[in-house]
Amino acid sequence: MFRSSGQAEAFIFYLGCCLFASEGLTLLILWFLHRESALEIVAVITASIISGRTASILAGQELGLHPLSIILILSIWNSGLLFVLLPLIVAFSQDVLKGRFLGNMLDSTRKRAEAQKNRISKYGPWGLPLFVWLPFPWTGALVGAVIGFLLGMSVKKALLIVVPSMIVGVVSWVFGFQYLFILTGVIGKIICVVLLVGMLLFPFLRILGVAGKA
């Protein structure tokens, strides 16, 4: 069972709510002033929700967003998501939210973190930052922070490691993918589209596969 240590988790949760509120207000203002920009931000965030960091970066590049815009969008979104969900995972056991969508999502995140905990601990102090930095599915900030907590870190210490690692990961992969596609030219453009479509469709194909087996 995960138990809250109190005020620190509450402050982090409220901070995450403030970040989400600021994002919502920004999108609302952009919707009236420049609707195209609002839709582009929503597209990047949606790609992040469906398939993770790599898909969201590719989506932003395919939409022609400036690299700094992609970095800002993903850093704020991922930080807000982390600050809201981590305190819930730490504070509540599976029984508290059992049978609800949020409870299932939090429990799934916890189980993935538990599955990776021993593997990450083998690499010592560099294991967790490297895990969060990697652009693969389920190697993001939230799972990384839960792993840190399972390894005995306080929530604050886990965040101090995970948040900078997440931002460095976003920055390095945004410019890394951009440089790769510049080098590869038209082929890089095709690769970008194929990767993006594949990553966005993969979660749905996996769900259909599981349903078919059932």
Image (cartoon, grey):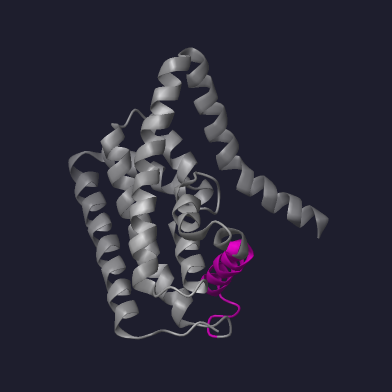
Q: With 158 as the anchor, is 89 left or right in this view?
A: right
Residue nearest the observer in this picture, 40 or 162:
162
Q: Which range is magenta? A: 96-117
The x, y position of residue 179, in whole percent, is 39, 24
Query: Which residue is rendered at x = 46% and y = 59% of the image?
Result: 125
The x, y position of residue 112, in whole percent, is 60, 63
112 magenta-colored: yes
191 magenta-colored: no
Query: Which residue is rendered at x = 56% and y = 65% of the image?
Result: 113
Q: Is residue 45 above or below residue 192?
A: below
Name the dominant secondary structure of the magenta segment. Answer: helix
Q: Is residue 42 visible?
A: no
The x, y position of residue 189, in whole percent, is 48, 20
Q: Is residue 125 above or below residue 62?
A: below
Q: With 148 as the anchor, is 20 left or right in this view?
A: left
Query: Which residue is rendered at x = 44% and y = 54% of the image?
Result: 129
The x, y position of residue 66, in whole percent, is 28, 31
Residue nearest the observer in this picture, 133 or 143:
133
Q: Is residue 128 visible?
A: yes
Q: With 199 as the anchor, is 15 left or right in this view?
A: left
Query: Which residue is rendered at x = 49% and y = 46% of the image?
Result: 134
Q: How many marks?
A: 0
Q: Name the quarter where the N terminus is drawn.
A: bottom right
Q: Is residue 69 above or below residue 52?
A: above
Q: Name the quarter where the C terminus is drawn.
A: bottom right
Outermost residue, right direction? 213
